[in-house]
């Protein structure tokens, strides 16, 4: 049986979408379609689904806000799993719980209303909580991992709680990049005033106003030790360089803009930048983005 019929019939209580457009659901705005996309409504359903997909050898990938994701450009004959239905938010003292589908904006508004500070460096970062945990979202002043107490995830079809020591957080990295699904996170915040939180959020909001406009994935590369990737790329003379409809931003060299190009254009430009930076400096850039099938 075709998976487009098999899976919705097997899991009728989940939200399914056929011929899912990756271009419409990623900020870079390019890519092909996936045979199916699904949104489980609870962690237990997600675990059952992932166990079934693995047992049947049906390919799948995860997609959050799609803000740092680059599709391959080829049709994906599998399932895009989205946790947009996992939107639980609650506070218990100075501990805040957020489901994987909560957006960064909703998380920060809830924290401010609850007088819980510490998450302000996440202001303006386009993300869902699940994706933010996987990629350890943040800026130099603070990352999501700074507040993590424990993460609820699914590993090999089993629901598991990961303590902070299990998460292996580092610069734009975590253990969850190995294919472990994140369904929620407990965060340690600090009691403070709404006014102080609002002031801090405005500081970070102002900084992001200077970032390039247009369709992008945000920063493409992790900053090497003692340097920023943007300055390194600029020194190599790569600002404004293009491949097809993709171009290195003339405003910030660690951004690649899609100006009507394809996923192949973007991927080719990323490869060229990596090659040129290594040729000129001997430094190997590490991609910050997530590549989708």
Image (tube, rainbow, N blue to C red):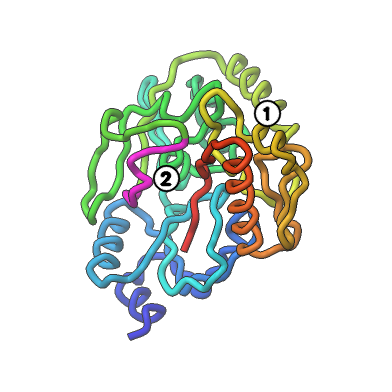
Residue at x 65%, y 54% (from the top left corner): 269
The picture places residue 198, in percent across and down from the top left corner, at: 63, 21
Which segment is the magenta one? 172-181
* Quadrant assignment, res 203: top right
Task: Decide: is 269 above or below 176.
Answer: below
**234 or 57, which is in the foreground?**
234
In x, y percent, where is residue 49?
Answer: 30, 63
Q: Which residue is drawn at 47% across and 55% down?
A: 63
How many marks overall? 2
On the image, the x and y values in percent for residue 255 come to: 67, 43
Q: Quadrant of the N terminus?
A: bottom left
For label 1, the SS is helix
Residue on which the image places disc 2: 100
Residue 205's disc is 1
Along the horizontal axis of the image, is 194 left or right of 183?
right
The residue lying furthest to the bottom in this view is 1
């Amino acid at each position: 049986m075709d998976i487009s019929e098999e899976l919705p019939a097997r899991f009728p209580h989940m939200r399914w979408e056929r011929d899912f457009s990756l271009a419409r659901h990623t900020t870079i705005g390019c890519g092909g379609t996936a045979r199916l996309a699904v949104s489980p409504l609870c962690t237990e359903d997600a675990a059952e689904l992932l166990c079934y997909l693995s047992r049947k050898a049906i390919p799948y990938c995860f997609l959050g806000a799609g803000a740092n994701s680059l599709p391959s450009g080829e049709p994906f004959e599998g399932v895009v799993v989205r946790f947009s239905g996992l939107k639980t938010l609650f506070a218990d003292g100075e501990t805040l719980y957020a489901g994987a589908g909560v957006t960064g904006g909703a998380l920060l508004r809830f924290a401010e209303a609850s007088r819980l500070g510490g998450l302000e460096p996440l202001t303006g970062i386009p993300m869902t909580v699940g994706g933010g945990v996987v990629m350890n979202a943040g800026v130099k002043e603070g990352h999501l991992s700074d507040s993590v107490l424990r993460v609820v995830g699914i590993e090999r079809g089993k629901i598991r709680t990961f303590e902070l020591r299990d998460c292996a957080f580092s610069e734009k990295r975590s253990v969850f990049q190995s294919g472990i699904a994140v369904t929620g996170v407990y965060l340690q915040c600090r009691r403070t005033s709404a006014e102080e939180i609002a002031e801090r959020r405005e500081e970070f909001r102002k900084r992001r106003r200077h970032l390039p406009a247009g369709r992008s994935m945000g920063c493409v590369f992790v900053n090497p030790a003692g340097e920023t990737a943007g300055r390194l790329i600029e020194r190599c003379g790569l600002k404004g360089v293009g491949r097809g409809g993709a171009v290195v931003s003339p405003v910030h060299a660690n951004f690649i803009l899609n100006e009507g190009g394809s996923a192949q254009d973007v991927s080719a430009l990323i490869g060229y930048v990596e090659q040129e930076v290594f040729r000129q400096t001997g430094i190997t850039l590490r991609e910050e983005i997530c590549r989708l099938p």
